[in-house]
């Protein structure tokens, strides 16, 4: 964040000063919503949470070094108090905000981030890159950070900080030394991406795909496309829209922006495209990066063929900011997975490979992960390494939930996954299990278990050295405990030797 006095912050966010002996004191540290992360000279946001209210931790934050607190009521220490706004659009990010205190603090955070980004853009030439899509946002963000870091100082969010809290929080990580700010933009309804784009106006906007994630909230892929396209509508005329040529709903967004358009993909028409794609035994892709400025070979360290499209999107941005094709290819080839529980591939000492992709799931990412699993096992049930798919429910699919889960179960059979373990007791889990049985009449090669503990017990008894195990579900299912248990067992085996 740009250095600002407490008094200036109050003016920006429309707040009043309480218990502030010196309004000229400058906030020189970070802005935090967790009092345990408070830094010296920082600013603390008093937000309500599931179990605690940030207002109750204001004193501790100041004792830890914060110079002031942004709050919805006086807290006994230096504070910028903002008026409660129960009907604010920021309230959609917080579930426990009956009195509007969280909405008020979020609104203040958004205003502060907007001011900081605006000043950095005008005075230091900060380039803001926004990324959206139904799947792949976080993986692409990580690749973008790797590419752009080879061209300048780059700030990007940890994990999926892509909502009304994480988005401005990340934007405030940029300072006078930052050249590139990479931000994810997610949505749970129309207008959400437009609102995020107002907080940190992007010059470059990347749209990856329009899939079936969040069908329950949007109703159709066309409605999802309408919302994802809010990003390109927010771009200035001198900006750049980076669009997926392999997705018709994305490529059609070219008509919705005043910015210049560059396309990526494997289509012959793509401006930045991949040719001669190959996969190694761990589903890591290599390809020729083909552009109007030349061609260079890329060998990715991240897993899954779907990463090719993500890499092409990152390449298009790198070329836009002046990087050579060879420099982009080198950066992509050195990029490693940076976010937890996303195609995190680890192999135990006994040769069991655990693919932890349990952070989240939707039909598109589930299909991509299953294909990567089969590539790693190479021949599934017919020989080679045995493949296990431990799958849980995919959330936010609405009326399409049963159908989509049934399709994933059937796909696991068509891809010849050795054994499918479906975790859960709800209708979607039953649909996935029944889909697999109806598609292939597998018998005991597909099993439905009630919870993660049962899945761990089954895997412990049956997984053999050399097997490959994929663990994937929506975040709310918490299926990463299965992956963690398998890896812990491997560590124990190693220690006992």
Image (cartoon, rainbow, N blue to C red):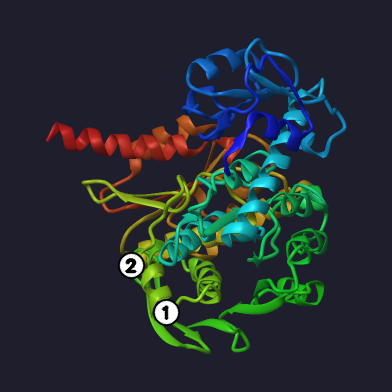
Residue name at image x 31 percent, y 63 percent = 384
The picture quadrant where one finds residue 209 is bottom right
Give the structural element (helix, strand or loop) at label 1. strand
Residue at image mark 2: 281
The picture quadrant where one finds residue 430 is top right
Residue at image mark 1: 287
> Residue 49 appears at what percent x and percent y?
65, 23
Query: In the picture shown, does residue 446 fall above or below 74?
Result: below
* Tags 2 and 1 touching, CB below 8 Å: no
* Relative side of 219 to 488, left or right: right
Distance between the alpha carbons at the discs numbered 2 and 1: 15 Å
> Residue 169 appears at what percent x and percent y?
60, 40
Considering the image in quadrants, where does the N terminus appear? Answer: top right
Residue name at image x 55 percent, y 26 percent = 34
* Relative side of 219 to 452, left or right: right
Is 48 or 489 nearer to us in this picture?
48
């Amino acid at each position: 964040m740009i250095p600002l006095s407490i008094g200036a912050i109050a003016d920006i966010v429309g707040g009043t000063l309480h218990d502030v002996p010196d309004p000229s004191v400058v906030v020189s540290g970070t802005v935090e919503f967790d009092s345990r992360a408070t830094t010296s000279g920082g600013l603390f946001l008093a937000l309500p949470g599931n179990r605690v209210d940030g207002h109750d931790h204001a004193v501790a934050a100041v004792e830890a070094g914060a110079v002031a607190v942004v709050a919805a009521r006086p807290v006994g220490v230096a504070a910028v108090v903002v008026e409660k706004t129960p009907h604010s659009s920021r309230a959609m990010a917080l579930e426990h905000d009956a009195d509007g205190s969280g909405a008020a603090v979020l609104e203040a955070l958004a205003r502060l981030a907007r001011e900081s980004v605006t000043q950095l853009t005008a005075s230091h030439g900060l380039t803001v890159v926004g990324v959206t899509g139904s799947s792949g946002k976080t993986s692409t963000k990580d690749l973008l950070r790797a590419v752009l870091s080879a061209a300048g100082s780059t700030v990007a969010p940890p994990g999926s900080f892509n909502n009304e809290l994480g988005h401005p929080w990340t934007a405030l990580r940029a300072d006078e030394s930052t050249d590139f700010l990479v931000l994810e933009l997610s949505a749970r309804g129309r207008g959400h991406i437009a609102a995020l784009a107002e907080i940190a106006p992007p010059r470059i906007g990347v749209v990856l795909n329009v899939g079936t994630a969040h069908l329950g909230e949007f109703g159709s892929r066309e409605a999802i496309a309408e919302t994802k396209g809010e990003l390109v509508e927010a771009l200035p005329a001198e900006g750049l829209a980076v669009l997926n040529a392999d997705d018709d709903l994305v490529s059609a967004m070219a008509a919705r922006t005043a910015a210049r358009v560059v396309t990526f993909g494997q289509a012959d028409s793509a401006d930045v495209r991949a040719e001669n794609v190959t996969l190694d035994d761990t589903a890591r892709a290599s390809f020729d990066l083909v552009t109007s400025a030349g061609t260079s070979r890329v060998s990715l360290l991240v897993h899954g063929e779907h990463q090719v499209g993500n890499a092409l999107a990152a390449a298009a941005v790198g070329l836009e900011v002046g990087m050579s094709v060879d420099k982009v290819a080198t950066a992509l080839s050195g990029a490693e997975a940076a976010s937890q529980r996303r195609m995190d591939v680890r192999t135990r000492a006994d040769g069991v490979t655990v693919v932890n992709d349990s952070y989240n799931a939707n039909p598109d990412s589930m299909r991509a992960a299953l294909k990567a699993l089969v590539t790693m096992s190479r021949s599934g049930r017919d020989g080679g390494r045995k493949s296990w798919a431990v799958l849980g429910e995919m959330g936010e699919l609405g009326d399409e939930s049963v159908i989509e889960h049934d399709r994933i179960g059937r796909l696991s059979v068509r891809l010849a996954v050795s054994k499918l373990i479906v975790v859960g007791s709800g209708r979607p889990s039953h649909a996935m299990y029944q889909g697999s049985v109806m598609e292939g009449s597998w018998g005991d090669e597909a099993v439905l278990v009630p919870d993660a503990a049962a899945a761990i017990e089954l895997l412990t008894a049956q997984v053999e050295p050399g097997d490959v195990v994929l663990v994937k579900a929506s975040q709310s299912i918490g299926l990463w405990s299965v992956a963690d248990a398998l890896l812990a067992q491997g560590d124990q085996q190693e220690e006992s030797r």
